[in-house]
Image (cartoon, rainbow, N blue to C red):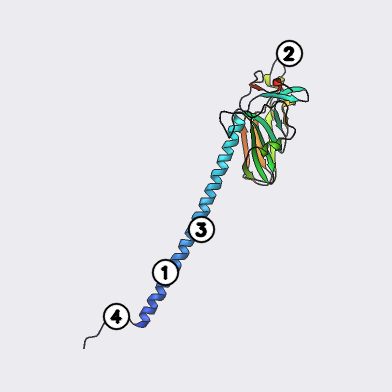
Amino acid sequence: MERQSGLTLIEMLVSLVLLASVLTLSSEAYRFYIEGAQRDSKGLAQEFDKLRNQQLLSNQFGSAVLYYANYDSVNAPLFVGEQSKVMWISQTSVQSSLTSSLSVLTIQDGKLLYCEQLLADTIIRRVPENPDQVCSVFSVEIAKTEAVKFSYYGWSSVLAQLDGDTSSYAIRGAPEWSSTYLGNQTGSLPLYISVESEVNSELSWYFQLADIDPSRVNYTGANHGS
């Protein structure tokens, strides 16, 4: 009588245990792979958003223009640079590259927001008293942070910027960093703006404004009425 070959019950049970162990290890490895891929994808998306928002601000600051408006009966460049917010006129806008805008960068509800109002919709004759109201028109979230400090590098006055001469002596000046920069005091715009978060070390940006010639006026709203 011939002996039949095959697996015994014990061998089958051992094989099933080994197969179950392999499947368990494979599923865990696949799960770790998927979780890692999701983390990497989320990290890349966040980095992309950060670079995109940084480029947005670079474009808007870089297209800043001299736009004269009324400060308490005095016409001066519309630029309000404070420690917690900054307002300026940009030759372009996020909504339309062919339309100028009143631009505001400020903190609201734990978010750094870029806000704008198209100048096609209105003429800015007076400097707005509450720049944050612009955010009710259009806003883009730049970053999540509770506190941001703005600093400004520029000339203290138009005379210092022009580096002109008087009848008896030369007026020599140099740009410097300051915590505020107001167009009605300096008569011009800063050269650079620093944006630094006080709670997020990754948010530390520097932006260069357009090379502004104070002897040329690109826009004026103050002359369109009061």
In terms of depth relative to the viewer, which is nearer, 173 or 189?
A: 189
Taking the image as shown, residue 126 lies to the left or right of residue 40, namely: right
First in sequence, mark 3 or 4: give its number.
Answer: 4
Residue 172 seen in this snapshot: no
Q: Residue under label 3, please give it.
A: 35
Camera-side mark, 4 or 2: 4
Q: Report helix, strand or loop for mark 4.
A: loop
Q: Residue under label 2, please give it.
A: 166
Q: Residue at x 45, y 65 (%)?
A: 27
Residues at marks 4 and 2, CA–CA distance in whole angstroms: 110 Å
Residues at marks 1 and 3, CA–CA distance in whole angstroms: 20 Å
Q: Residue under label 4, please give it.
A: 6
- The answer to whether the residue labelled 1 contacts the one labelled 3, judged by CB atoms less than 8 Å apart, is no
Camera-side mark, 1 or 2: 1
First in sequence, mark 3 or 2: give its number.
Answer: 3
Q: Residue under label 1, please give it.
A: 22
Amino acid identity at mark 4: Gly
Q: Report helix, strand or loop for mark 2.
A: loop
Label 2 Cα neighbours within 10 Å, binned few <14 / some 14-19 / many ≥20: few
Q: Quadrant of the N terminus?
A: bottom left
Seen in the picture, residue 175 relative to 33 is either above or below; the reply is: above
Q: Report helix, strand or loop for mark 3.
A: helix
In the rendered image, residue 56, in percent from the top left (x then y), is placed at 58, 36
Residues at marks 1 and 2, CA–CA distance in whole angstroms: 88 Å
Residue situated furthest left in the rendering: 1
In the rendered image, residue 199, in percent from the top left (x then y), is placed at 68, 47
Amino acid identity at mark 3: Glu
